[in-house]
Image: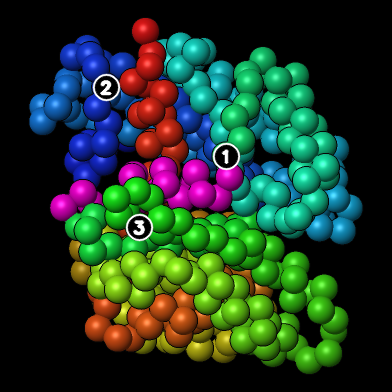
Amino acid sequence: MRVARCSIPILAVFLLVATARAEVHGGIEIGAKGVKATVIEVTGTGDAQEIKVLLSGSKNTTLTEGLRAAEKFAEPALKATGQAVADFADRMQKEFKVPAERIYVVGSSGLFSALEGKAKAIQANQALLADAVAAASNLKMTFIDADREAQLSIAGIIPPHHAENSLLLDIGSGNTKGGYRDKDYITLSIPYGSVTFVDLVKKQGQKGTFAERAAQARETVLLPGLKKAAAQKPGVSKRTRVYLSGGAVWALATLVRPGDRSAYVKLTAEDIDAYHKLLLQSPEAVPTPDLSAIKDEAAREAAKKDVNAVKTAFKPEQLLAGAEILKAMAKEYEFGGGKQLFFARNAQIGWILAFVTEKSRSSP
């Protein structure tokens, strides 16, 4: 299998490894939907530094499905997750020669959004997951909270020359988080993502269609939650550049602006409304955009691949849940008020890269 080697110069400024020789590091993230893996190669230092992504892969293990009701990870999902970690780690070591001590396994903040406020249940499930990973791969895990994850995402996604006037908002499967850099990191989060918001809507009963109940929950749950999350954080409303990340935004960009293959896809509040309406038109299936207007064959094939990937990764109701979160953000944080919106295409590995970078600084 041929390995894609793509430079990400925007992230290079953050990856200050104190050695001139090439080093490889592996990051494995366990999130609400499954496992993501990244291998990076770092060469040089300072302005001469080059970062290459040697591997970017994922495995859907539906780890948190049913967690809200059962308050415990299902045994098959735990086993599948542990095996996915082991498979990625084995590939990292054999194919990319990553030393075991430079493979970092991280449990993301969205894993336990369904158990918010239940500290004992969270601790018990952390232990179950850590044991499953250790049994399958002999690797130790680190768990990070929403604030820490947001800090890493800000460092790994927002271009440094725009840091002073930029806000990051990330819609994950388990939660939504973000923030900005002031004198320190200012972060925010709500315990709803494209998967957990679906669970909430279903839990509220069966009266009306899913779309009707989701729209109602946007008004009664999402908007108040976003308002509270941004309280006493003036930068949320004052920042004029908004970087959007997460699977929900990737799906939006793929279905509404499939021809734009740039690293930062320009979006508008109108795009969010158009996306929401598009999903409502086909509630039982993921819509397929017309790609015939994309003249460049390579770009058209890349867009087609992304469309198919969206259909594999998301159920229609999960896409709608993500769209409801985006609509709530657009209203509460005034996306239509002259702000510039961007989908950060490489954001899915941004915070993992930042985490790996921190670890690499202390590597022998």
Q: Amino acid at mark 1?
A: Ile
Q: Earlier in the sequence, mark 3 or mark 2?
A: 2
| Three-letter amino acid code at the position of disc 2 | Val
Q: Which residues are magenta?
A: 145-161
Q: Quadrant of residue 140?
A: top right
Q: Main secondary structure of the magenta part?
A: helix
Residue at x 70% of width, y 20% of height:
134
Give how far across and how far down residue 214 sits, in percent.
67, 82
Q: Which numbered disc covers residue 180? A: 3
Q: Secondary structure at mark 1?
A: loop
Kindly give the residue lying farthest to the top in the view shown. Answer: 364
Label 3 close to label 1 by CB (< 8 Å): no
SS state under label 2: loop
* Residue 236 drawn at (x, y percent): 38, 69
Q: How far apart in space, not on screen, are marks 3 and 2 (Cα)?
A: 24 Å
The outermost residue toward the right is 70
Which residue is at a point 75% across and 67% down the rendered structure image? 199
Q: Is residue 83 above or below residue 19?
A: below
Q: Nearer the viewer, mark 3 or mark 2?
A: 3
Q: Nearer the viewer, residue 97 or 157?
A: 157
In the picture of the structure, the residue carrying the numbered disc 2 is 17
Badge 3 crowding class, 10 Å Cα cut-off, few under 14, some 14 to 19, many 20 or more, is many
- Amino acid on which disc 3 is placed: Tyr
Label 3 vs 1, first from the N-terminus = 1
